[in-house]
């Protein structure tokens, strides 16, 4: 994933959860990238979009713990969060299953047998 360089001033503003403009700008830059990452790993479009929202929420909760003087660049830190969330989604989510019941299934089969071709 090729992440753009993030301005230090924008990252600093993200620490203020009330700075709507900073979060809007951050979302405009990074949300499409996160969605592309999820799509490239096999998620469907709607799932990738939902996951991107979840990742942005995770970032908003964790941004104060990111150390700008630490060893990891911001984009490396963000990529790690996104990779972990995508992996968790792919490995821990139960697959979609039909919600029909046995009673409905039995009714469908009984109807098709009783309305079959008449034998003379």
Image (cartoon, rainbow, N blue to C red):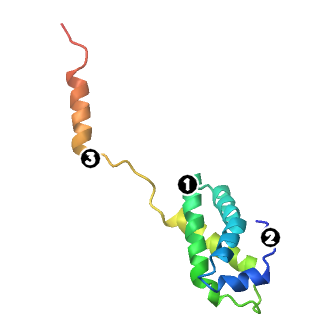
Per the image, label 3 sits on a secondary structure element best described as loop
Image quarter for residue 86? bottom right
The x and y percentages for residue 120 are 18, 6
Q: Quadrant of the N terminus?
A: bottom right
Which mark, residue 101? 3
Question: The residue tagged with tag 1: helix, strand or loop?
Answer: helix
Q: Residue at x 69, y 72 (%)?
A: 26
Q: Tell me if label 2 and label 1 are in contact, CB under 8 Å.
A: no
In this rendering, the answer to whether 1 lies above or below 70 is: above
| Residue 110 image-quadrant placement | top left
Task: State how far apart marks 2 and 1 are (Cα).
Answer: 24 Å
Q: Is residue 56 visible?
A: yes
Locate residue 116 relative to residue 52 in the image: left or right. Answer: left
Decide if residue 73 is in sight here. no
Q: CA distance from mark 1 to mark 3?
A: 27 Å
Along the line of sight, the residue nearer the viewer: 52 or 17: 17
Name the residue beneath numbered marker 2: 4
* 87 up-or-down from 75: above or below: above
Q: Which mark is residue 46?
A: 1
User: As drawn, is 87 to the left or to the right of 98?
Assistant: right
Q: Residues within 10 Å of mark 3 (few under 14, many from 20)?
A: few
Circle nearer the N terminus (2, 1) = 2
Crowd band around label 1 with a 10 angstrom C-alpha radius: few (<14), some (14–19), many (20+): few
- The number of numbered badges drawn on the structure is 3
Residue 112 position in % (x across, y down): 26, 26
Tell me: residue 64, above or below residue 10. below
Name the residue: 63% across, 86% down.
Answer: 16
Q: Residue furthest right?
A: 5
């Amino acid at each position: 994933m090729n992440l753009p360089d993030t301005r230090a001033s924008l990252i600093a503003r993200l620490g203020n959860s009330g700075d709507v403009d900073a979060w809007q700008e951050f979302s405009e830059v990074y949300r499409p990238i996160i969605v592309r990452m999820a799509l490239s790993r096999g998620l469907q479009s709607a799932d990738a979009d939902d996951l991107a929202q979840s990742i942005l929420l995770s970032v908003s909760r964790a941004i104060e713990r990111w150390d700008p003087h630490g060893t990891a660049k911001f984009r490396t830190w963000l990529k790690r969060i996104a990779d972990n969330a995508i992996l968790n989604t792919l490995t821990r989510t139960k697959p979609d299953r039909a919600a029909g019941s046995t009673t409905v299934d039995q009714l469908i089969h009984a109807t098709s047998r009783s309305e079959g071709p008449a034998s003379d």
